Amino acid sequence: MAILTVENVSKSFDDEEILKDISIELNKGELVSILGVSGSGKTTLFNLISGLEKPDSGSVILEDEDVTGISGKVSYMLQKDMLLPYKTVLDNVALPLIIKGEKKKIAREKAREYFTDFGLEGTESKYPSQISGGMKQRAAFLRTYLFSEKVALLDEPFSALDMLTKQTLHEWYLEVMDKIHLSTLFVTHDIDEAIMLSDRIYLITGKPGQITKEIVIEKPREKRKDFNLSEEFLRYKREIVEELNKKD
Amino acid sequence: MLPSPVQVAKAFYTEFPILMEHSLVTLQEAFIGLFVGILTGFLVAVIMDRFLYMYKAIYPLIIITQTIPTVAIAPLLVLWFGYDMTPKIILVVITTFFPIAVGLLNGFKSADKDSINLLRAMGATKGQIFVHIKLPGAMPHFFSGLRISASYAVVGAVISEWLGGFSGLGVYMTRVKKAFAFDKMFAVILLISVISLLLMKLVDIIHKKCMPWDNKEQEL
């Protein structure tokens, strides 16, 4: 069953069409990537889904509810962790609960419960400047989760990290996702990352950006250790690269 | 005409009780004025940040008030409000509120757009964005404004006392000047500098206390 559906969404800025007729489906527990080169309108799509902007036509549906142009329904996370430097990690993470009107004390207690699951124990009373980049992303991700446990939108959340931290975080992410039954829509320009993490990949190409291909990664998510060194992986990669180059 | 440092030190020592008496009055004016200055500065900054037309309407006026020399307004204030504390406090307010209002306003305006968007995506109200992003983000700007204002406050109070009053360091200054007691004159100048420095130090201490995240950065 689809938890999030984007139906025929189009968007223009100043007479320039950015996105045309985009339709996307995200099923419960799935990780779906939207892959495209820079400037293909990925982030715009993201803002439309998160409700920060309104599409010119089409709609965004979250569990039978029309949330087109309504913010505060799906959570999102960017490449920058955007943890507030003047709040402790715990207060940063608890922020979405406080925004929703929860009492500070209760919000903190609720947030604290997840620290172990997310591998963040011991960082509660630290400030973001005192923890490592990987930890910051984890904290930002927990904040995203506490904001909406249904769907997480991630906009290149790992791209600012070094290779090894990135790999660790990929594994960590898949693990956590299974634990908390999250559905994720993932925007990236990193082909390897998309194949490693996704159940399905939408390719967005051209100007205006359109979904030109949908690729299903058959390999089960839990068996993806060293997947990126296999023949199968390369086949997917070739398929994607060919499609992305076609429109140029 | 130019007393030696020893003479100044001597004058400082013998005049100490009287100097303290006068400082108390000046400090009182400075503190009340600074407090009111912070309140008005804060209020004006919030209003200007919240409403663009208020910003456009008020900002030029504020700039103009700062181009009028304090010494020029002080006698008028004395004429309007008399010889007691009120005109002095008003003058201190006028001089101190500006650095605070401008500092805070810059702080509000330089708030991180992505952070604001993030909170908007969370469904935050304008008030919540203000409390969680803009206000804490503006704190460093506020404190650098306050640092300037704290020293302005003392000087402002002294200047306004020159032009009439019964006690205060400024009044004392005009008296010793008329008596050609230059050693005492230098003693009081020294005292005013020391008071200003101490106030700025106090602001720094409060700054550190209020923003623990700023000085913990090196610990990692």
Image (cartoon, rainbow, N blue to C red):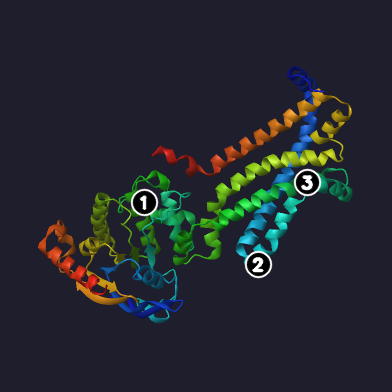
Q: Position of residue B140 (x, y in %)?
A: 55, 47
Instruction: Mark 2: give few (<14), some (14-19) or many (20+) Cα within 10 Å.
Output: few
Between disc 1 and disc 3, the foreground one is 3
Amino acid type of the residue tagged 3 in the rendering? Thr
Q: CA distance from mark 3 to mark 2?
A: 28 Å
From the image, tell me which residue sits under label 2.
Answer: B53
Q: Position of residue A77 (x, y in %)?
A: 37, 61
Amino acid type of the residue tagged 1 in the rendering? Lys
In the rendered structure, the answer to whether residue B90 lies left or right of residue B211 reads right
Amino acid type of the residue tagged 2 in the rendering? Tyr
From the image, tell me which residue sits under label 3.
Answer: B70
* Among the 4 quarters of the image, the one containing residue B4: top right
Residue in view at x 35 percent, y 44 percent = A122
Q: CA distance from mark 2 to mark 1?
A: 39 Å
Looking at the picture, do discs 3 and 2 lie on one chain?
A: yes
Residue in view at x 70 percent, y 55 percent = B63
Q: Secondary structure at mark 1?
A: helix
